[in-house]
Amino acid sequence: MATDTGQSNQQNTGIGEDRPLKRGPLSKWVSSSIQNPERAYRAMFYVATVFFLFTTLFPFYWLLVLALTPQNLLTNVGLVPNGFNPMSFVTVFERVPFHIYMFNSLVLGIMTTVIVLLLASLAGYVFGRLRFPGKAPMMLAILAISYFPPAAFLIPLFELFTGNVAVPLLGTSLVFGEQLYLNSPDLFNTPWAMVLPFSALFMPLSIFILTTFYGQIPDGLEDAARIEGTTRLGALFRVIIPLSAPGVATAGVLTFISVYNEFFFSFLMNNGEAQNWAPLVGGIIGLQGQFDTPYHLMAAASIIGVLPVAILVIVAQEKIVSGLTAGALKE
Amino acid sequence: MGDVKLEHVSKHYDDVTAVDDMNVQIRDGEFVCLVGPSGCGKSTTMEMVAGLTMPSEGTIHIAGHEVTNLPPKDRGIAMVFQNIALFPHMDVYDNISFGLRLRDYDKEEIDRRVEKASDVVQLEGMLDRMPDEMSGGQRQRVAIARAIVRNPEVFLMDEPLANLDAKLRVHMRTELQRLHKELDTTIIYVTHDQAEAMTMSDRIAVLDSGQLQQIDPPLTCYNEPANLFVAGFIGSPAMNFVEGEVTENGFRSENLDVEFDPARMGVNVGDQVTLGIRPEDVYPADDGRTLSHPTAEIETVSDVLEPMGDEIFIYLLLADDVETNLEETASNNQLLMSVDPDSDITEEQDVDVVLDRSKIHLFDTNSGQALQHGLVNPTTAESTTGTEAESDD
């Protein structure tokens, strides 16, 4: 027995135990990673996460640095603020009615969310629960809209909403002796100039999310509701939507955030005045005077503007994640 | 008045005909089972009565009103589903009262009715539970309470017991019969389980490939099946079938002959017929002496025994050459017999059997229609007189 173990030990020493001595820390780590690939994956995960967090969070940190730096020290800003001036967060509200801009943003977001959820629910019901010819191409066409760059719509919609588009009314020249025109409504400086394009642009994603959710509610439940006395619409609102609550919440939150973050239409469909329904963008840009550009105030305003959405995401994140994955992982 | 009338009702899908020219009249207070194999159109028929599916042709009347194009909510029906279909986001009270609340009943009236309905199905004290906190049987009782609370004209039940375990199913079966007696409402019940249909219903409607085969009381379907399909579907284990030909001396097949006078049985010499006999109407020759109308003895060899406890099923081979029979297990050569459990017959033993003539059925092999029930000469017949088959039913 003793000789046996001795021999095998010798053999091991001869082949295996010498080599680690020549290895540095990196090659050791490499060889152990080859033994356990999970280590390598975990390391990659940490690297990717740290990189992602850095690129996402650094701008926020930079905003905070800017916001806290007093105006006269705004040159050569480093990684640490050149002073400490929390009064910027108050000054923002003194220079412009920033709370009204925020209120406008909230109202625009909520209006759009309600419209989108209502219409996308009906569309989601049709796409998720009914069978009809041309369903797949129609769904694709709707999704294709969401891939269009919003800027492509800007000029035609601006013309339309400023009342510059006139449609000739056919036959009026025969009846009244002169050609009559129907002018597009003047929606500039009203919420509708923003809510309408927002609703159209953000609808496809909500339709898609709600379609997957409504499609998974068992037919029997809808049948039961209809037998019990609802119409198809009643069954949608009393049974299907309550059971798809995570999906509806996801669609709603995503729509709200998209509207809150939107720039083009928010900037161009009003004159930037708080009383003319300009959202946050108007407030931040409105801080800019004719002779100065108060970066510290704009940074402070940005941070204030981000807060409601940050809170919403933190509160709703579990629902959003479960909502987005529930569609993918059926049952 | 909860009578239901289907006239020339058909349902075509793109390339399939699910229901083909269905004509059924169901009387007020009747318990009718629609029974048939999967895909026979029984569920489609029920969905059309419920209004969940619109018929392609034909009309449906419920309680004297035409409802063919009415939505489900205006038909005066309630339905119990196979997958139970309770609303998972509502508690038991809300589930039961759902239909009442939609119809704007008073709060007191709703309370009173919910209480009464939950009494009937024995759900006292569970009204605040959520469906996922309940067992399968309790959920099914909630679904039934939800159906009865509105006092509908007609109950539709789509395999309501299919998802329950065997013991609970038998229990709920008697509960449903009790409920039917108590409420005295028309019930249309869909099932693929012929035992359920036999035990519960006033009449059975047997469906196959979208067509109504027979609608009659259970024992009529059992004793006088209208055609080969009904004969094979109703009864477990299934009826024995032997294909053969009518000769001057009676029925003749490869391995089994039964003598009778063709002229008196409404068949012609040369007809291709199928003889049907249920396992319990096949007797060992010794026991068969007590029969009033036994056939001649038939030589068989026992093959496989299936002891069930209260009876034994014995598979008998009709041909002399056992080897060939084992290879080709054609039913034509095989006869299933049910005997007392104390029988001493063993496997691979020569057994002589007789058939009870009064229980022999003759079917037209090609059309499947029943030609004759009972092969007792009409002159000497006592109980079963050979009548014309209800082939046009």
Image: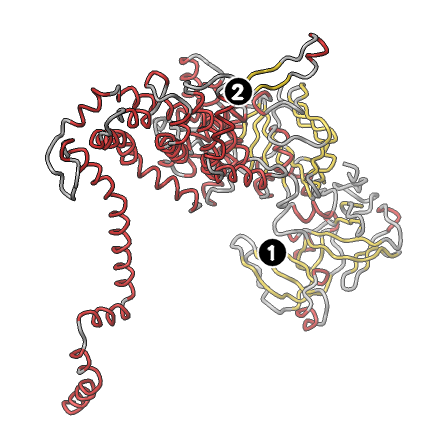
Q: Quadrant of residue A316?
A: top left
In the structure shown, which secondary structural element does the residue marked by tag 2 occupy? loop
Q: Residue at x 13, y 35 (%)?
A: A73
Q: Position of residue A210 (x, y in %)?
A: 46, 35
Q: Is residue B119 visible?
A: no
Q: Position of residue B27 (x, y in %)?
A: 66, 25
> The residue marked by circle 2 belongs to what chain?
A
Q: Is residue B99 above or below residue A324?
A: above
Q: Which residue is mark 1?
A: B339
How packed mark 2 is, by other alpha carbons closer than 10 Å (few <14, some 14-19, many 20 or more), is: some
Q: Are marks 1 and 2 on the same chain?
A: no
Q: Is residue B248 above or below residue B88?
A: below
Query: Left or right: B368 with respect to B222?
Result: right
In the structure shown, which secondary structural element does the residue marked by tag 1 occupy? strand
Q: Is residue B65 above or below residue A205?
A: above
Q: Which residue is mark 2?
A: A164
Query: Left or right: A311 with respect to A108?
Result: left
Query: Left or right: A244 with respect to A132?
Result: left
Q: Amino acid at mark 2?
A: Asn
Q: Quadrant of residue A9?
A: bottom left
Q: Residue at x 61, y 55 (%)?
A: B338
Q: Position of residue B131 (x, y in %)?
A: 39, 33
Q: Is residue B114 visible?
A: yes
